[in-house]
Amino acid sequence: MDMINGADTVWVLLSAALVMLMTPALGLFYGGMVRQKNVLSTLMHSFFMLALISVQWVLFGYSLAFGPDVGGVIGSLEWAGLRNVGIEPNPTYAATIPHQAFMIYQMMFAVITPALISGAFAERKRFKSFVIFSLAWSTLIYAPVAHWVWADGGWLRSLGALDFAGGTVVHITSGVSALVCALVLGRRSGYGKEAMEPHDTTMTVIGTALLWFGWFGFNAGSSLGAGGLAVSAFVNTNSAAAMAMLAWMTAGWIQHKRPSVLGASAGAVAGLVAITPAAGFVTPMASLIIGFLAGGICYFVVENLVRGRVDDALDVFGVHGVGGVLGAILVGVFATKSINPAGADGVLSGNFSQLGVQALTVGIVAIYAAGMTWGILKVVDLLFGIRVSEAEEEQGLDSSQHGEVAYRMGS
């Protein structure tokens, strides 16, 4: 107990609260972009994860992700039900804060990750199947990958993989899984033939602002202490988001002859995604470069490669998948021990091997997430059916799945 640092503990708990806010903020970000008849369903996809994954994390998710290592692949169930996870520090992960503070902080990452996937299958997935899929996905994909990359003894961590706040664990897993979901579920009825315009862009902008706010806890909180590394990650997070927003909006302005509000929102999120794995390893100037590349490349992928070919309803793969891959790779270029001695140098600091480690990590995580997601979807579809009927889709998921509507106008 004597090792606990009050400032570090307060910062981690505050950061956990900031990351918690990101999940309902994601619901607003996604909810504004769907049609009015699917707003509640889309909000629920994010909001419900706060309950489902919080319980899963306490019962066994945390133990699988961070528990005592089993062969570098998974944690044992020694910490199931938070047994042996108390208020004293755990020097393996966080020597200056209570073990439960580290646990609850990591819980919020586990909560938002399956919620991110939901944007790909918005407006067409059966809610019961969504619940079962999310629980299975968090257990069979998120927990093992978190262990590989972050846990003591995890095999990718042992190889030297760097992921400061979740570029591989959160964004590559969710982004790649989102693409698989979009392909397996197929296009929405009328996709490409009828307008599917966002019903409330204001809601999306509010969601973006709250995500940006919460992301300071996501990235700077991953320092697990109130010190210089947290400040560095905070500055890098804001810089990358700002630059990516400018890059995406400018690219859209050039191509479509107007500055898009939705484009600005998507660009900011793309920058936040890309800087996530690098936030605690790079300089502010590197963060601007990462943000610029994220805004431009993610825009190009969404506008010219994915949209119109695959019905990734809310561009999850183009923003989170591509942004996560880009950020994870660029760690191998821009990382420097002058920012974080516990990290590694990248190519620009003379260490070319780190780029190879990052590329290998990206490939392994992407392939695992894609294959396991496909398998989970097929099993859930066989047992319960994953897609609503055509009539339910036409009615809207708010009414057909929840028996409620978002807005009642007039009489």
Image (cartoon, grey):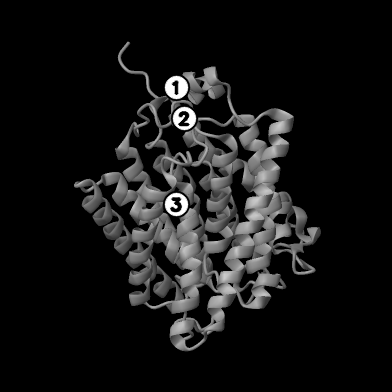
Mark 1 crowdedness (10 Å alpha carbons): few <14, some 14-19, many ≥20:
some
Where is mark 3, residue-wise? 318
Q: Which numbered mark, 2 or 3, is in the foreground of this view?
A: 3
**235, 282: nearer the viewer:** 282
**Disc nearer the start of the sequence (3/1):** 3
Q: Which residue does the image show at 22% across and 53% down from the upper left?
A: 254
Mark number for residue 40?
A: 2
The residue to which callout 1 is attached is 405
Could you say which is closer to the camera, residue 191 or residue 207? 191
Q: Residue at x 46, y 65 (%)?
A: 326
| Residue 23 point in image, percent of width and height | 49, 47
The C terminus - image quarter: top left
- As drawn, 141 above or below 243: above
- Residue 284 location, quadrant: bottom left
Judge whether residue 166 can be spotted in this image: no
Kind of residue sitting beneath label 1? Val
Q: Nearer the viewer, mark 3 or mark 1?
A: 3
Question: Does label 2 or label 3 sit earlier along the sequence?
Answer: 2
Q: Label 3, label 1: how many angstroms apart (C-alpha)?
A: 30 Å
**Residue 74 — which label?**
none
> Under tag 3, what secondary structure?
helix
Left or right of 346 in this view: 154: right
Q: Residue at x 50, y 84 (%)?
A: 345
Which of the two discs, 2 and 1, labels the residue nearer the N terminus?
2
